Image (cartoon, rainbow, N blue to C red):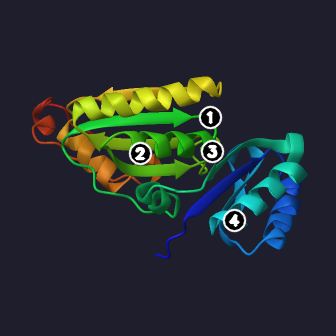
Amino acid sequence: MKKHPAIAVVEFRDIAVGLHTTDAMLKKAPIDLIKSGTVSRGRFLTLISGTTASVDESYYEGLTLGGGNVVDSVLLVDVHPEVHDAVFGHRNPCLPMAIGIIETNTVSSNIRAAEMALKGTGVRLVEIRLADSLLSGKGLSIYQGELHEIESALEIATNILEARRIEFTKKIIASPHEGLVEQINFTTSFSEAKLLELEGEGDLLPGLVFP
């Protein structure tokens, strides 16, 4: 995977504006287009990467041209390696240790929170999900580490999100069930999840017969 020092995300309220503005962003400076396209809630999402100077120039072109149609955005000029890889779709293994979860109503705010949480603590990033068809335009990130580190990471994220008046939900699972760990390792998407037959559950109703 090619590494980039800078990454930017711009979320547009309208698809037509997103397409038009993304074209202008690509023409403004020599950047790489990670991905762009429609996401749920009828929005358009654009992710770019490259050198700090080029991404900075294209990002502000997007904000200027997009204007009030920009729902949210983020520019990371020295992106954390785990955030970088997660944006490109990489997932880390989920282990039997404390889990932190952050859900935000925009993708950009979740990436921003993840960046600061990882740089400020020793937590690991399991995954970031970016407004896919099942998230209704939301961002989702999952973290792992020692409980005190998870608590610190979510406190950092909370301060950032509250300061920007972003709607969010956060939760900590201090000691996750092995079934949940296995499920997260496979996927956090219900449509892609597999059946987990946990030991002992088949004996709960031994006389029950299904037609």
Q: Which residue, given by chain and number where applicable, does mark 4 sit on?
A: 53
- Pick whichever of labels 4 and 3 is earlier in the sequence: 4
- Badge 3 crowding class, 10 Å Cα cut-off, few under 14, some 14 to 19, many 20 or more, is many
Residue at image position (10%, 34%) is: 203
Q: Which residue, given by chain and number where applicable, does mark 3 sit on?
A: 108
Q: Position of residue 186 (x, y in %)?
A: 32, 56
Q: CA distance from mark 4 to mark 3?
A: 20 Å
Tag 1: amino acid: Asn
Q: Position of residue 181 (x, y in %)?
A: 25, 45
Q: CA distance from mark 2 to mark 1?
A: 22 Å
- Pick whichever of labels 1 and 4 is earlier in the sequence: 4
The answer to whether residue 85 is visible is yes
- Pick whichever of labels 2 and 3 is earlier in the sequence: 3
Tag 4: amino acid: Ala
**Which label lies toward us, 2 or 3?**
2
Residue at image position (83%, 69%) is: 28
* Numbered mark located on residue 119 in the image: 2
* Numbered mark located on residue 105 in the image: 1
Quarter of the image with the C terminus is top left
SS at mark 2 in the image: helix
Q: Are marks 4 and 3 in contact (CB under 8 Å)?
A: no
**Which label lies toward us, 4 or 2?**
4
- Badge 2 crowding class, 10 Å Cα cut-off, few under 14, some 14 to 19, many 20 or more, is few
